[in-house]
Image (spheres, grey):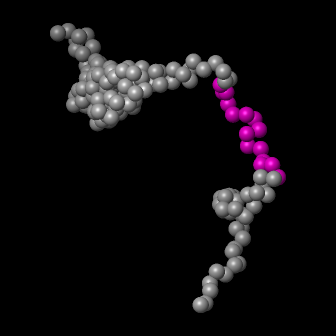
Amino acid sequence: MTEKDQNSNESNNTAILKDAWAIRPCSVYKDEYDDCTSFKARFHQYFIHGEDTDCTQWNIDYKNCVRYQDSNGNDVQAGAAVIRSEEERRLKRFQGHYGNTVWEKRKAPPEDWAKPLPEWLEKKNENSYLQLKQMEMDGRAVPEDTKSYCMIM
């Protein structure tokens, strides 16, 4: 084996996945698969969709996750397969969000988002628990409760 081949093998073995944080604990994939194939879930799937949902991807992800974990992160192909599956699952989940053309998406909050509350709302919050906590956070003096609730019977 040439020196160049050795260097390429070492770089493949020490390759770190960029999105390794996206891989969930392996028990989660197993739990999702078990839940997806349970009688209750199958009944729900048939009731909602009219057919059973394909649960094989959860099992494939579980097996790839175990392979990745058992190799201490050296089985890059298994880790990459789990990450690809997570990305596909995320895109499928957000498909309605990305396809929504009714609402205009904001890049930043409105400029006046932190303006003071209207007077009627300030008056409503007067002497409330929320106002007392806000006064504590601001460092202002909190009025002491002078009422006595002690009764002798």
Query: In the rendered structure, does residue 20 fall within the stretch colored magenta?
Result: no
> Which residue is at the far bottom?
153
Q: Main secondary structure of the magenta part?
A: loop
Image coordinates for residue 147, horizontal then vertical, percent? 69, 78
Q: Residue at x 78, y 48 (%)?
A: 116
Across and down, in percent, residue 139 comes to 69, 62
Closest to the observer: 100 or 70? 100
Number of numbered discs present?
0
Q: Quadrant of the N terminus?
A: top left
Residue 96, by quadrant, is: top right
Q: In the shown orientation, is residue 149 left or right of residue 60?
A: right
Q: Residue at x 79, y 58 (%)?
A: 123
Foreground pick, 127 / 25: 127
Q: Residue furthest right?
A: 119
Q: Residue at x 73, y 57 (%)?
A: 125
Is residue 96 in sight in this rendering? yes
* Quadrant of res 71: top left
Residue 65 appears anywhere in the view: no
Q: Quadrant of the C terminus?
A: bottom right
Placement of 116 over or under 89, stated as above or below: below
- Assess whether residue 110 is covered by the magenta stretch: yes
Q: Residue 126 at what x, y percent from top left?
A: 75, 61
> Residue at image x 64%, y 80%?
149
The magenta span reads 105-119
Q: Looking at the image, which is closer to me, 66 or 56?
A: 56
Q: Position of residue 79 (x, y in %)?
A: 31, 24
Q: Is residue 138 left or right of residue 35?
A: right
